[in-house]
Image (cartoon, helix red, strand yellow):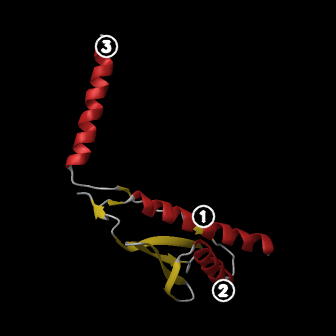
C-alpha cells in the first residue's frame, strides 16, 4: 500500500500536466500587478514620478495625458505596451498589446503570455512604487 500512493500521485501529476498541454494554452498566466497607492499625493508630482520610473528602466513613453500614459518596451522583435492610469488614488498598470510574446487566452478568457512579460511588468511596477515612495518621504 505504501508503494501505491506515490504511484497514484505521479500518475495524477502526469495527467494534470497532459491536460494543461492539450488545452492549447501557451505561456504563463499573465500577472495583474497590485496598484500603487497615491492617496493624498499631488497628481502633477505623481505624473513626474511615473515618468521618472518609466525612463529609469528604459521603457518608451508613447502617449499620455495628465492622469495616464501609454508606455512600451522592446527587445528585438519582442514588444509590449502598457496603460498606466493614475486618475484615482492608485497607479494601475494594464496590458494593452504585445508582439511575439505568445499572448493568448484559455477557454475561460484567462490571459497567458511569455513569462518575460511578467518580469517586465513587475519591474515597471516596482520602479513606479519606488518613485512614488520618494514623494511620500519628501513631503
Give the crowd class for mark 1: few <14, some 14-19, many >=20 residues within 10 Å. Answer: some
Q: Residue at x 49, y 65 (%)?
A: 121
Residue 21, position in %: x, y?
Answer: 24, 47
Residue 114, position in %: x, y?
Answer: 37, 60
Give the crowd class for mark 2: few <14, some 14-19, many >=20 residues within 10 Å. Answer: few
Q: Which numbered disc flags the more N-terminal residue, 1 or 3?
A: 3
Q: Which numbered disc flags the more N-terminal residue, 3 or 2?
A: 3
Can you identify the residue that label 3 sits on? Answer: 3
Q: Do callouts 3 and 2 mark residues in contact (Cβ within 8 Å)? A: no
Residue situated in front as seen by the camera: 34 or 13: 13
Disc 1 on helix, strand or loop? helix
List the single residue furthest toward the front: 76
Q: Residue at x 66, y 86 (%)?
A: 44
- Label 1 to label 2, Cα distance in Å? 20 Å
Q: Looking at the rendering, in which quadrant would you find the C terminus?
A: bottom right
- Label 1 to label 3, Cα distance in Å? 47 Å
Q: Where, by quadrant of the figure, is residue 96 drawn? A: bottom left
Q: Residue at x 33, y 56 (%)?
A: 27
Give the crowd class for mark 3: few <14, some 14-19, many >=20 residues within 10 Å. Answer: few
Residue situated in front as seen by the camera: 67 or 96: 96
Q: Which numbered disc flags the more N-terminal residue, 1 or 2?
A: 2
Q: Looking at the rendering, in which quadrant would you find the N terminus?
A: top left
Residue 38's disc is: none
Residue 42 lies left or right of residue 102; in this view the side is: right
- Label 3 to label 2, Cα distance in Å? 65 Å
Residue 44's disc is: 2
Q: Nearer the viewer, mark 3 or mark 2?
A: 3
Disc 2 on helix, strand or loop? helix
Residue 126's disc is: 1
Amino acid at each position: 500500500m505504501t508503494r501505491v500512493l506515490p504511484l497514484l500521485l505521479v500518475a495524477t501529476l502526469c495527467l494534470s500536466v497532459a491536460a494543461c498541454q492539450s488545452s492549447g494554452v501557451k505561456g504563463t498566466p499573465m500577472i495583474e500587478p497590485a496598484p500603487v497607492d497615491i492617496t493624498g499625493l499631488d497628481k502633477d508630482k505623481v505624473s513626474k514620478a511615473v515618468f521618472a520610473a518609466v525612463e529609469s528602466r528604459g521603457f518608451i513613453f508613447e502617449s499620455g495625458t495628465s492622469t495616464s500614459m501609454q508606455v512600451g518596451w522592446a527587445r528585438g522583435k519582442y514588444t509590449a505596451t502598457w496603460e498606466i492610469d493614475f486618475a484615482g488614488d492608485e497607479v494601475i498598470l494594464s496590458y494593452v498589446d504585445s508582439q511575439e510574446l505568445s499572448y493568448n487566452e484559455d477557454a475561460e478568457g484567462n490571459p497567458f503570455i511569455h513569462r518575460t512579460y511578467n518580469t517586465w511588468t513587475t519591474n515597471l511596477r516596482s520602479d513606479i512604487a519606488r518613485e512614488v515612495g520618494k514623494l511620500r518621504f519628501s513631503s
